[in-house]
Image (cartoon, rainbow, N blue to C red):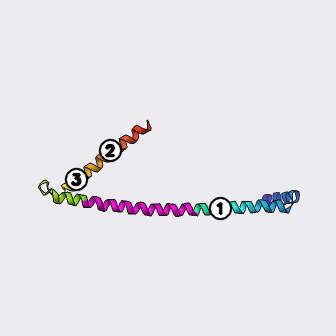
Amino acid sequence: MTMFKSLLKGLSSLLGETVLDEVQERVDTTIDEVKLAVEQAAENVVRQLILLAFVILGLVFGLVGIAKLLNDALPQLGQGAGYLLLGLVLLLVALIARHSGRERKR
């Protein structure tokens, strides 16, 4: 750290105090701008994660509701048929989405 201080003292005697003050002001301004940008990014990430949690929660409730509706609509298939049917459909959709994602990369 003393080497840095001696370098600053040498620069200040060479360039004058006004130039050094201007450089220090620009550095401080840049640091403040970066801090503000990081804070805004962190707030945005938290906001997006909360929104994602609500979406996932909504999807879970919606899917459970559809499964219960299928169970009630198709009692002849037995208890849990709605959950099984909905689970298989979602698995099929996931497999198709994964396969189509691989095709796009090629």
In the rendered structure, which amino acid carries the disc numbered 1?
Glu
User: What type is the residue that disc 3 sits on?
Assistant: Leu
Q: Name the side, left or right, on which 26 lies relative to 11.
A: left
Residue count near mark 2 (Cα–Cα under 10 Å), binned few <14, some 14–19, many ≥20: few
Quarter of the image with the C terminus is top left
Residue tagged 1: 33
Specify the segment rendered in magenta: 39-65
- Foreground pick, 22 / 78: 22
Residue at 22 percent across and 53 percent down: it is 84
Q: Quadrant of residue 74?
A: bottom left
- Which residue is painted at 29% across and 46% down in the image? 92
Q: Quote the CA–CA distance across marks 3 and 2.
A: 16 Å
Residue 95: numbered disc: 2
Image depth: mark 1 or mark 3 in front: 1
Amino acid type shown at disc 2: Leu
Sequence-first tag of 1 and 3: 1
Q: How far apart are marks 2 and 1 (CA)?
A: 45 Å
Looking at this view, is 11 or 102 the one in front?
A: 102
Label 2 or label 1, whichever lies nearer to me, is 1
Magenta region includes residue 4: no
Q: Is residue 81 left or right of residue 101?
A: left
Q: Mark 3 points at which residue?
A: 84
